[in-house]
Image: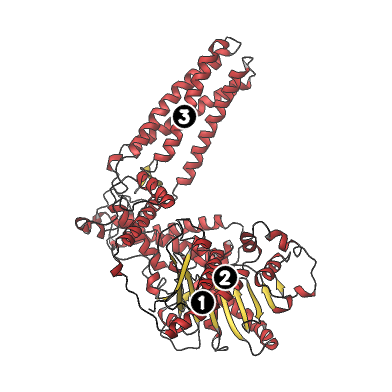
Amino acid sequence: MPGMVLFGRRWSLASDDLVFPGSFELFLRVLWWIASLTLYLMHRRKLDCPGGVLLSTYLIVLLVLLAVIIGIVLAIVCVSMRGTICNPGPRKSMSKLLYIRLALFLPEMVWASLGAAWVAKGIQCDRTVVIGIIATVIVSWIVIAATMVTIVFVFDPLGGKMAPYPPCIPEHLDSNSSNHLLTGLRTAAKSVWETRVQCCCCCIGQDDNTRVAFSSTADLFSTYFSDTDLVPSDIAAGFTLLHQQQDKISHSREPSEVVTHTPGQPQETELDAEVENCHHYMPFAAAAYGWPLYIYRNPFTGLCRIGGDCCRGRDIEYDAVEGDEHHCHFASILKTTGLQYRDFIHVSFHDKVYELPFIVVLDHRKESVVVAVRGTMSLQDVLTDLSAESENLELDIELQDCVAHKGIAQAARYIYRRLVNDGILSQAFSVAPEYRLVVVGHSLGAGAAALLAIMLRGAYPQVRAYAFSPPRGLLSKSLFEYSKDFVVSLILGMDVIPRLSVANMEDLKRRILRVIANCNKPKYKILLHGCWYSVFGGSPDNFPTELDEGNQGALTQPLLGEQTLLTRCSPGYCSGDSPLDSPKYPTLYPPGRIIHLEEEGGSGRFGCCSAAQYRARWAHETEFSKILIGPKMLIDHMPDVMIRALDRVVADRTACVSCPGQGGSNVP
């Protein structure tokens, strides 16, 4: 950081990013040089054949060219190791070295072309020599092609839109001119991000919802990255340092600093009941994922178990199934829930942007009509997740503000229309009028389930919702408090999704900027140590991650590139304001009351959940107001991991039912 400036434009590559690719190329070039030299020395006497002079000349010039390239690449690697992330001064000669390295590609391409042409002439020389030279030509073109692909990946479409005046003195631009320039830059950034999103989702059909989602996602990304000059490796280094910082704080905390509260008997009894309910309803949320999750959970036997039902001809028992062409989804749902065909009211696997699959089933054990909403499973679902701006909800309740995550609110509204307008719930309660309504979901489905329960509560006052690993950025403060009466959220360990919101992402960005600015180690050492630490553990004190008092003032300004327009050229730019601090992205909260399954003791950095011990407790939403970095931040979000954790918690609590104080909870 900042990104390198080459050919008058910024690239998505910093001058300290070339240690690892340069070392790999250096290793490859040295092997190549040794092999070519060995080939020449061992077979030079066999090059007196017709055309052998050309091959001899090719090998000699190739050896000289490789030696020069090896020297330049070695210099690039050595220079790239200097300095720190925020101190690129010792690497100021990097641009000149890269210009020389790129210039050497021209003779290399010319010589590789000549070598290919000479070999193609069918020179009658020793077969080993000819094969060796063919191999060198192939390797030359592979290296050249790999370099071209790398250039495409590190190309920044916005790199040419830098400040028109290097010092960017305020008198060069008046306020109106700078505002126009900033508006143009932000518009260009949004356009670039929208193009990237469209390329990633090129297989999705274009409709109004999809176009709106593209625009919302592009707006989020362009706004989030508008005031930083981070390259991808800077973010990776920041993650590794934050991981060590978290562990350092955890290790240094004295036992007396941890305040515990002994729960009363009513709260403990209620916790036991809600944990048991979560254990019962989680398979319904998992079943909504269909056959992919079932096969994932049963990799060796799953396909055989549902294979008999897949591709079966449609009959009357499948009339309630929508969007399941081969019936594999329905077959896996039957296996996951253990229910019968007649227990299903409606199964929909219709999947579009803002339109989630869901199932409606009669649960006779709990005497409930269960609506299970599927979580993120497709690119359409990802776009729904990333439509993160807020949206007002029209509800028949008197609250100060009814604001929610736009994409999830749209998905919940779609399911609400299907359930009510299509008469799906009426059909269910006509079969079982004495049952109560329960809405469940995991991840994206958890957020939609919570909002759906809020929408349905007017017509079904006894509705309950169980949200497994819901996203944090879901409800306004008023809706969050309102949902506590009928929504329970379950969060496992370090799961990142219940900590994920626009506000938390902004906080994460600031923490990354702060921690990499304070670290005095080069980036390659940070990444190497971080990989070792994540896999094998060790002491988190090897790298400084706390700010010295003398450096606090320096970090009140944003850490941006030297030629970044937003800092240097905008008279109205305020470093304390975040681009995301706007009515479009207000602070949002998770749904309902929260049960946290905490791991006790640990089972290794990538330990199997079945070997881990967990305890359940009531938690406050503020405990999830910061994103935690660790090996299990994604693993703990998987539905199969949560099912195993719930199995263990319920089994332990049942075994210890006669042991008061075991598996206790903390009341916020």
The quadrant the C terminus occupies is: bottom left
Residue 157, given in percent of the width and then of the height, sits at 45, 50
Picture quadrant of residue 264 = bottom left
- The residue tagged 1 is 275
Q: Nearer the viewer, residue 247 or 554?
A: 247
Q: Amino acid at mark 3?
A: Arg
Disc 3 is placed on an element classified as: helix
Seen in the image, is 662 located left or right of residue 300? left
The tag earlier along the polypeptide, 3 or 2, is: 3
**Vertically, is 376 above or below 417?**
above
Task: Give the class, few, some or many, for how many residues have Cα within 10 Å of label 3's Cα (few <14, many ≥20).
Answer: many
Q: Residues within 10 Å of mark 2 (few under 14, many from 20)?
A: many
Task: Tell me if residue 159 can be seen.
Answer: no
Amino acid of disc 1: Val
- Kind of residue sitting beneath label 2: Tyr
Q: CA distance from mark 3 to mark 1?
A: 60 Å
**Residue ID at (79%, 69%):** 314
Q: Which numbered marker is on residue 91?
A: none
Q: Earlier in the sequence, mark 2 or mark 1?
A: 1
Residue 73 visible, this angle: yes
Secondary element at tag 1? helix
Q: Secondary structure at mark 2?
A: loop
Tell me: residue 601, above or below residue 463: above
**Residue 431 location, x and y as percent?**
70, 86
**Can you tell which quarter of the image residue 288 is in?**
bottom right
> Where does label 3 land, which residue?
29
Q: Are marks 2 and 1 in contact (CB under 8 Å)?
A: no
Numbered circle sitting on residue 354: 2
The answer to which of 158 and 91 lies nearer the viewer is 91
In front: label 3 or label 1: 1
Percent x, y of residue 484: 46, 82
Q: Up-down: is 474 above or below 178?
A: below
